[in-house]
Image (tube, rainbow, N blue to C red):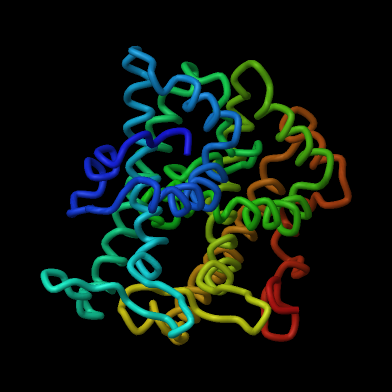
Amino acid sequence: MKLIQSIDQVRAYSAINVSVTLDLLLPYLSESELLFIRPVIGKDFFNALADNKDSQEDIWIQALDLVRKPLVLYGLYLGIDEIGVSISGQGVQVIGTQTHTPAPQYKVANLKENLMRRAHAGLDNLLEFLEANKSSFDSFKPLDSGLFIRNAAEFSKYVDIRSSRRLFLVLLPIIHSAEQKFIRPILGDALFDALKTAMQGPSDISEDYKLLIGQIRPCLAHLTMARSLDEISIDILDWGVFANAESTFTNITTKQSANRERILTMQKSNQLDGDSELKSLQLFLDHNASDSRYQQYFTSALHSAPDTSGTRNQYVNDKTKSLFFA
């Protein structure tokens, strides 16, 4: 464990009475690093933090402080069910003393939920800090992947994800898929690729492109959410598919189905919004494309004259020909 050197550091970030030795927690802290921290900030930046753990520069002191908190909290969450348990020839036993007894199950459940909630919030705070100071950290690579929606704040303008950077990272593959399946067919390959190239260029993009991106983002956000509502709330394991909600002790110990009716309502709402916005995007291009504006679309077979625009139905979503459930 490169970032935690003492049990006092664990106590400082946990806010609970931790009376075990650091050696006992090291396996869980290491697993926390592998499962939660490194996949989000990257291996190179994690190693850079370790190399600068004794730095006196304020920027590294702040970064280390912000990364240690979720690292510790996730580690404690992972270790709660195993610490104090022994396996011997007499079976699985809980170690106890005359002055200390095992906590009731509801207290363990509440503690696990609080640790996970605080760890998630801490990881979001870390990502916010890194994004705001990315010019100071050469080894930190933001994971926007050149998408039309680049960060959690932009996504939250159209679908409220509480600006959660963690959730945005989960959504990245779905956003990419939605771009390829739904936005590229509307724009056409030439305009889609030209727009992507302009976004990744060294200078600001044109006002026409900014206007077009403003049309793309709301439908992309709603289509992504409609596609993801089922996917991000489940665990796919080798023995089945389970809801992964952890709001109660019951859901922690026995994974249960989420509120399917509510998910379907949200999914339908986002799907309808996305379909409507896709059609608006198509109409926008048909009415505004010319030899000087969105020329790649104007000269393609996708373009329709304004008086006939909107009559095409290849993107209409219904139960027999759905964008998501064909």
Q: Could you say which is closer to the camera, residue 185 or residue 196?
A: 196
Residue furthest to the front in view is 89
Q: Is residue 45 above or below residue 224?
A: above
Could you tell whether 208 is left or right of 308 in the image? left
Q: Could you say which is closer to the camera, residue 216 or residue 176?
A: 176
On the image, the x and y values in percent for residue 134 come to 48, 23
Q: Is residue 92 above or below residue 156?
A: below
Q: Residue at x 35, y 45 (%)?
A: 22
Q: How many marks?
A: 0
On the image, the x and y values in percent for residue 42 come to 58, 37
**Quadrant into which the C terminus falls:** bottom right
Q: Is residue 318 above or below residue 56?
A: below
Could you tell whether 299 is left or right of 11 in the image? right
Q: Could you say which is closer to the camera, residue 43 or residue 93?
A: 93
On the image, the x and y values in percent for residue 316 come to 69, 72
Residue furthest to the left in view is 99
Question: Residue 58: which quarter of the image?
Answer: top left
Q: Residue at x 60, y 35 (%)?
A: 43
Q: Is residue 211 above or below residue 238?
A: above
Question: Residue 12: which quarter of the image?
Answer: top left
On the image, the x and y values in percent for residue 262 come to 42, 81
Q: Residue at x 57, y 64 (%)?
A: 276
Question: Residue 210: which quarter of the image?
Answer: top right
